[in-house]
Image (cartoon, helix red, strand yellow):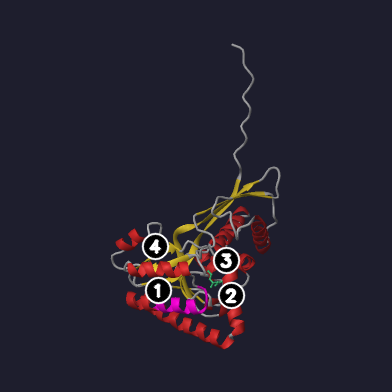
């Protein structure tokens, strides 16, 4: 039997150099005021996050991005992604090399769930993994903070801290995060308002308000801080009615800061009509997700918001 030509060699599998992942975040209380030094509470987004894998790139380069929608949309434009990766290499002292970067995420972008912070922490972890560098939560958070500032301009650090720590926490800029003490369980639904929004623009709008009325805005931040303290105490006591009161009051503050939106208010009205004790915007606002505290029987709410993300604190 004559031998035919040998089959073409198949291309070798891509060489995986490192991988990293991080959850998104959900702010419970205190967004915006936290940028001005007040405390805020946050938890990881339930079961949602971002995974990064780095592969050796044998030709081309310097970097190829393998993204899937919805990540491939603002603020994750190619230029910003390149800059974020360069920031991470520089912060970790790792020389850049040609890479294929595979990113997968189930976090909705521009919706207040910390997709950019999750990406930054996952990138830092993947680059550290590829360089066989140990990376603590504190370091991962610090590296990601630089990227956060690039994406959002002014940032408190709560998003990268929650993505890096992956636990419910109380955060105050400049202080180590404190794990949140939770008694019992609190069930939440995250409902998309249907409107995307830019954290950078929302933070800039609050800064403009503060420039126009420094005294009034700082006083409002102090009211928010008091509400965050009462919400934190309610969570520690397992006191759902007091937490509901804190969420409702915080939403009123956020309206006064100008970061609510008719689409957010429509979700809140509907959630309350379906039995939710409270609902508020979460994250930067002006669109994005609404955080809904679920009642003891969440079934009617689930039916009212079939696409909602559900999660439990505690
Ligand atoms: C964004 O998730 C939360 C803001 O308070 C901004 C920040 O803290 O960096 C709006």
Residue 60 seen from this side:
yes
Q: CA distance from mark 2 to mark 4?
A: 30 Å
For disc 2, the neighbor class at 10 Å (few under 14, some 14 to 19, many from 20) is some
N-terminal-most mark, 4 or 1: 1
Q: CA distance from mark 1 to mark 3?
A: 31 Å
Camera-side mark, 1 or 3: 3
**Most prominent secondary structure in the magenta stretch?**
helix
Camera-side mark, 1 or 2: 2
Q: Is residue 165 magenta?
A: no
N-terminal-most mark, 2 or 4: 2
On the image, numbered disc 2 is attached to which residue? Answer: 205
- Image quadrant where residue 301 sits: bottom left
On the image, numbered disc 1 is attached to which residue? Answer: 181
Camera-side mark, 2 or 4: 2
Q: Is residue 169 left or right of residue 198?
A: left
Nearer to the camera, 223 or 5: 223
Q: CA distance from mark 1 to mark 2?
A: 33 Å
In the figure, 85 relative to 287: above or below? above
Picture disc at residue 311? 4
Q: Are marks 1 and 3 in contact (CB under 8 Å)?
A: no
N-terminal-most mark, 4 or 3: 3
Span colored in magenta: 246-259
N-terminal-most mark, 1 or 3: 1
Camera-side mark, 4 or 1: 4
């Amino acid at each position: 039997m004559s031998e035919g030509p040998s089959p073409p060699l198949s291309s070798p599998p891509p060489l995986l150099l490192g991988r990293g992942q991080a959850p998104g975040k959900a702010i419970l209380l205190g967004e915006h005021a936290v940028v001005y030094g007040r405390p805020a509470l946050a938890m990881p987004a339930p079961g949602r996050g971002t995974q990064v894998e780095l592969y050796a790139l044998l030709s081309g380069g310097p970097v190829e991005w393998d993204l899937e929608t919805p990540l491939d949309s603002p603020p994750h434009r190619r230029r910003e992604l390149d800059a974020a990766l360069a920031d991470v290499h520089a912060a970790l002292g790792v020389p850049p090399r040609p890479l294929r970067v595979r990113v997968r995420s189930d976090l909705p972008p521009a919706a207040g769930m910390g997709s950019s912070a999750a990406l930054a922490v996952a990138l830092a972890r993947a680059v550290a993994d590829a360089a066989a560098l140990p990376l603590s939560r504190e370091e991962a958070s610090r590296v990601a903070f630089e990227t956060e500032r690039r994406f959002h301009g002014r940032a408190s650090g709560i998003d990268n801290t929650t993505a890096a720590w992956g636990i419910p926490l109380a955060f105050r800029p400049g202080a180590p995060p404190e794990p949140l003490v939770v008694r019992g369980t609190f069930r939440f639904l995250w409902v998309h308002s249907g409107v995307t929004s830019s954290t950078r623009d929302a933070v800039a709008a609050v800064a403009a308000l503060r420039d126009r009325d420094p005294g009034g805005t700082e006083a409002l931040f102090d009211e928010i801080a008091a509400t965050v303290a009462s919400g934190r105490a309610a969570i520690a006591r397992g006191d759902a009615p007091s937490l509901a009161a804190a969420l409702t009051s915080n939403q009123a503050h956020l309206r006064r800061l100008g970061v609510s939106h008719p689409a957010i208010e429509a979700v809140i009205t509907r959630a309350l009509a379906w039995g939710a004790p409270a609902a508020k915007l979460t994250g930067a606002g002006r669109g994005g997700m609404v955080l809904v505290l679920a009642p003891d029987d969440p079934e009617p709410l689930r039916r009212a918001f079939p696409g909602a993300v559900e999660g439990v604190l505690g």
